[in-house]
Image (cartoon, rainbow, N blue to C red):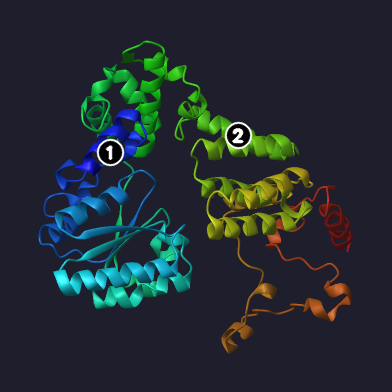
Amino acid sequence: MFQAAARREAVSTGAIPLAERMRPSRIEDYVGQAHLVGAGRLLASAIEKDRVPSMILWGPPGVGKTTLGRVIATRTKSVFVPFSAVLGSIQELREIVAAAKDRLDYKGARTIVFVDEIHRFNKAQQDAFLPHVEAGTITLIGATTENPSFAVNAALLSRCKAFRLEALKEEQLMVILERALTDHESGLGTSGVTAQPEALQAIARLARGDARRALTTLESASSFAIARGETELTVDTLATLEEKAPLLYDKTGEEHYNVVSAFIKSMRGSDPDAAVYWMMRMLDAGDDPLFVLRRMIIFASEDVGNADPRALSVVSSADAAFRRLGMPEGIYPMAQAAIYLACTPKSNAVKNAWQRARALIEKHGALPVPMKLRNAVTKLMKQEGYGRDYKYAHDYDEGVVPGETYLPDELTGAALYEPTEHGEEARIRARLAMLRQR
């Protein structure tokens, strides 16, 4: 009774965020993931028969991983114990397992241990679950935004069933938003605020499949409207919110590509200040950091290349560091890589080289390999002239055969790679000029 009263007080004062208040407790109220919990599906059948296996739920943020864990516990009459991979300790896990064992032995009650962000556990921490999962002391439900094939130990993964959750569709988000507006117990039903369908559609579209983001935006917009003495949310209300910049940044729309373009061009233009600014614009708007890192890896070869061969290593290391650190600490290596790329010498000679090579292939087709370059692996091949007149480069000064060519005969003299005078390529250019003169 006291807990219920305390919750009502927290709801009325806004102490509990709307996204948490609207978390459903029944499988019937769960929105989305019909491929998992729809009639006749594997997970739905397991829940219905009360034979839920240990599992890994993976998918983007805000798609219902934690909620699904809770509704499974409710439906199967199991005790739900949340455990944070960020804040939890091995000692705390031991206490949870001990309590679960007592619960099972003396009351016959099962325990679901829900581990959020399980990918943040190291191998030793993940291995700590193995004996308890195998013994059936606990049912483990791990949640992760990372591919479990890479983020979860093989030993633990082999003992769990992996289920992929998908980003929610706009129409599903609309159901959640409309429910929150009209719910008088946990939602905004007592606030008197209504919303134009276009406003809810805008929130659903820009939430990018994330129910938590959609509900947080709805809550902020409602508070903003009430403060202005308004009772209806409109598209104009959303546009005037203080946090309108992230709202107007659509990861699949024009503004997304504008910001990405600004990021790339800032690095290409050697402006580290602008590079970091646009990078943070993307991250703060919810862009996948791995997408940003991928763009920097491409940039390291496309726009830097051999002007600074270390650039690719720097970004690759940043990518590896981020995958280990996650957010927010992973921003450090990302910012370091972006600044390095902006400050280092630039060259697009690598891109030009492979594009010229492709153009020659399209023009001349598959030209035959010169006989001297072919590998004579049989006696017949040697008789046919395979490998004849090939000169072993290491037998010559500086490892270079004077006058030798390696392109197809029809392309002799073609120059595909033309290094610039920038950075390390200046040295490469001088050496290549000497080699070509020979």
Q: x and y percent of residue 306 in the render?
A: 75, 55
State how far apart marks 1 and 2 are (Cα). Answer: 50 Å
Who's the residue at 74% across and 36% down the image?
271
208 relative to 68, above or below? above
259 relative to 313, above or below? above
Query: Does residue 210 show up?
Result: no
Who's the residue at 62% across and 35% down the image?
278
Front one among 121 and 163 = 121
Q: Which residue is mark 1?
A: 6
Front one among 18 and 306 = 18
Q: x and y percent of residue 242 in the render?
A: 50, 22
Amino acid type of the residue tagged 1 in the rendering: Ala
Name the outermost residue toward the front: 2
Direction from residue 322 to residue 221 in the image, left or right: left
Name the outermost residue toward the top: 229
Who's the residue at 33% across and 34% down the image?
18
Who's the residue at 55% across and 57% down the image?
325
Direction from residue 156 to residue 278 in the image, left or right: right
192 relative to 148, above or below? above
Q: Quadrant of the N terminus?
A: top left
Name the outermost residue toward the bottom: 379
Amino acid type of the residue tagged 2 in the rendering: Ser
The answer to which quarter of the image holds residue 198 is top left
Find residue 261 and name its label: 2
Q: Quadrant of the C terminus?
A: bottom right
Q: x and y percent of residue 46 in the render?
A: 15, 61
